[in-house]
Amino acid sequence: MAAKFIPRGVIPAVLLPFDAELRIDEQAYRSHLRDVTAVDGISALTTNAHASEVHALSFEEQKRVLDITLDEVGGKVPVVCGVYAESTLQGAKLARQAETAGARCLLVFPSTVFMNGVPLHRPEMILNHFRRIAEATDLSLIVFAYAIAGGLGYTTETLVQLAEEIPQVVAVKDGCNVPVQHERNIRSLHSLGRPLSVLTTHSAWLMASLVMGVDGLLSGAGSVIADLQAQLWRAIQVKDLASAQALNDRLWPMTNVFYADPRVDMHNRMKEALVLLGRQKHAYVRPPLMKLSNGEIHSIRLGLIQGGLLK
């Protein structure tokens, strides 16, 4: 077994371009991968996740996306692959496929089956889900922890149990969206006596999350603003508060737009931002996602101007 990959630092989750017929646009995707990987300060990147519209990809398309990613940037940065599946058996199959292809780590999403009371009343189902996936692969696992309020989040106790009982669990991507719980998760997971990363995905309040002591960030916004995220991460690490505040002032107008309600459009907005910045030609999304209104695209433009990315 290879040494465990423990994710830390700035890890963008890349977007996935489509063409006008809503097929994967390989040329545009490769260009996007090169752009993100060229950012100074990133430590890995993630594909087949929310930012990649993984919900709309077939099993074969997920395999193709991972293959393209590894071919384009696999020799430059470690690649984290999402495991997005309703069924535990399907999740195990995706895990085996990712390991065979050459991914370094897996980001395991909750099954929407958990929404029906599992996190609070049947947490053993969550433990079994992760055990079965861990049995299928030697890769490191990142637990994606959603917000409890949405019905799919994990309690701090469940996160600790996953880390204690499944050695391949090396990180938690914390999206609980409650500052008090976020800090409790960080403190509890860091007290376990073994290397375990807490990666924030609270991009809408990133600076506040970083100063709580997380080990890095894993964010779809990194597809657009990874350079600013990396600078903020470095400023926090050296306790340069003035620089961190200045960077946060630049990030705020952009993340405030990206993560506005409805949150379902957050990555849709990021695609439009890449078009406005001249990094992509189109911002096609697969249904049920839909094209944004001209008014919302104008708001994204204003956010980019206020953040200093557009004149």
Image (cartoon, rainbow, N blue to C red):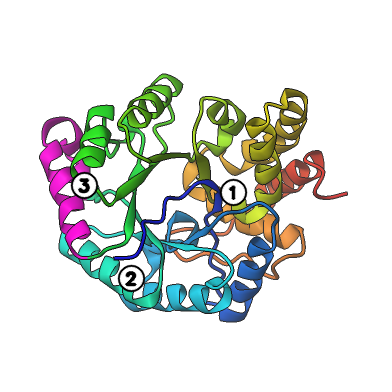
Give coordinates of residue 144: x percent, y percent.
Answer: 35, 45
Report helix, strand or loop for mark 3.
loop
Report helix, strand or loop for mark 1.
loop
Residue drawn 59% across the image and 73% down it: 29
**Span shown in magenta:** 113-136
Task: Reply above or below: 17 against 110.
Answer: below
Q: Is residue 20 visible?
A: no
Of the numbered discs 3 and 1, the one sitting upstream in the chain is 3
Q: Which mark is residue 221?
A: 1
Residue type for callout 3 = Ile
Q: Which mark is residue 99?
A: 2
Residue matched to label 3: 166
Residue type for callout 2 = Glu
30 on left or right of 119: right
Residue type for callout 1 = Ala
Task: Reply above or below: 88 against 308.
Answer: below
Near-viewer residue (163 or 253): 163
Of the numbered discs 2 and 1, the one sitting upstream in the chain is 2
264 on left or right of 292: left
Looking at the magenta stretch, what is its main secondary structure?
A: helix
